[in-house]
Image (spheres, rainbow, N blue to C red):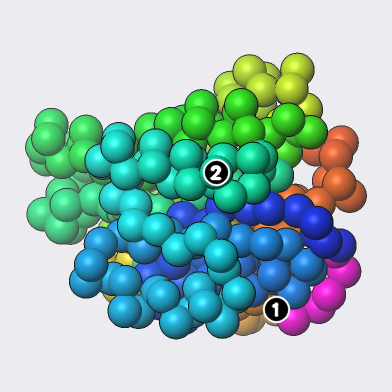
Amino acid sequence: MTQMTDLAGKTGLILGIANAESIAYGCAKAFRAAGADLAVTYLNAKAEPHVRPLAEALDSPLILPCDVTDDAQLQAVFDGIRARWGRLDFVLHSIAFAPRQDLHGRLADTSRPGFLKAMDISCHSFIRCARLAEPLMDRGGALMTVTFYGSARVVDGYSVMGPVKAALEASVRYLADDLAPRRIRVHAISPGPIRTRAASGIRAFDRLIEESVADTPDHRLVTIDEVGDVAAFLASPAARAMTGTTEYVDAGLHLTD
Ligand code: NAD
């Protein structure tokens, strides 16, 4: 990890750690190494034993359950942050879900419930986080989510997640406009393909990895630590003149056809 950023005295919320391979964990390590205190959530009781040891290694004082489809749980996370810190500096939302049958089929065949579920968990939950974080970000702040270039290009096997990520990136732009008066910045981070649990649900992901290595200008994949370095920069005051952006952390993959 390359340490370039100072987040000492800052507090952040991390949603989306499933295990040590998660992009959210790469980001959380970078935030912590830069000095931030972190609240960490886990999806449910099944996920907790995998997430808790990682959160403890990050010295997290708040380790809370959060399925974003449960409004009461999401509210309880922000209530817990208010009770512990009284305020918040940044949020990393690194969550996506689509029902398998919809993800594996053609977009043309996507069911309405599947589309709505994917959009709710992967996009609208970020908007809900923004609304709940806003009153806690009394000194400004940064909201970050994680997207993929399947939003702008047709990537074989990405299906319903393409339009969902396009909506997420558009939401970043509109939230950036809504929240600018409170000096809250909003960013999407767009990594190249990384082997994670969520990625293993994408049909033909192995081929996507092979093609990415072939197409990327210096023929390599990116790591969760590299994504973390960019997230830590975006959380820091060094990024104060940036908002509404989609930042590619893909070693140039988005430049290629
Ligand atoms: P991951 O499986 O480690 O993380 C996905 C997370 O989403 C998990 O922690 C899971 O618990 C969480 N999640 C799913 N449904 C949820 C719900 N209802 N409530 C709360 N949390 C829920 O995989 P990852 O690759 O680190 O994914 C993180 C983000 O990165 C996703 O938005 C994904 O689309 C994005 N992304 C991944 C890649 C890649 O190649 N891995 C590339 C670009 C973008």
Amino acid type indicated by mark 2: Ala
Q: Nearer the viewer, residue 107 or 140?
A: 140
Label 2 element class: helix
Q: Is residue 231 visible?
A: yes
Residue for point 63% across, 18% down: 178
Q: Residue at x 23, y 67 (%)?
A: 45
Residue receiving disc 2: 83
* Rendered position, 131 above or below 143: above
**Residue nearer the viewer, 207 or 33:** 33
CB at disc 1 and ligand 1 closer than 8 Å: no
127, above or below 40, in the image? above
193, 99: nearer the viewer = 99
Q: Is residue 130 left or right of residue 18?
A: right
Where is residue 149? Give x, y as percent.
51, 51
SS majority, magenta: loop
Answer whether residue 106 is magenta in the image.
no
The boundaries of the magenta stretch are: 1-5
Taking the view exactly as shown, the residue that stands out farthest to the front is 83
Q: Is residue 207 visible?
A: no
* Residue 4 magenta: yes
Q: Quadrant of the N terminus?
A: bottom right
Of the two numbered discs 2 and 1 on the same chain, state the one appearing first in sequence. 2
Q: Amino acid at mark 1?
A: Asp
In x, y percent, where is residue 35? 78, 67
User: Is residue 19 positioned above or below 114 on the image?
Assistant: below
Q: Residue at x 55, y 44 (%)?
A: 83
**Image quadrant in which you'd find residue 59:** bottom right
Q: Which residue is mark 1?
A: 218
Circle count: 2
Q: Secondary structure at mark 1?
A: loop
Residue 181: x and y in percent read 75, 17
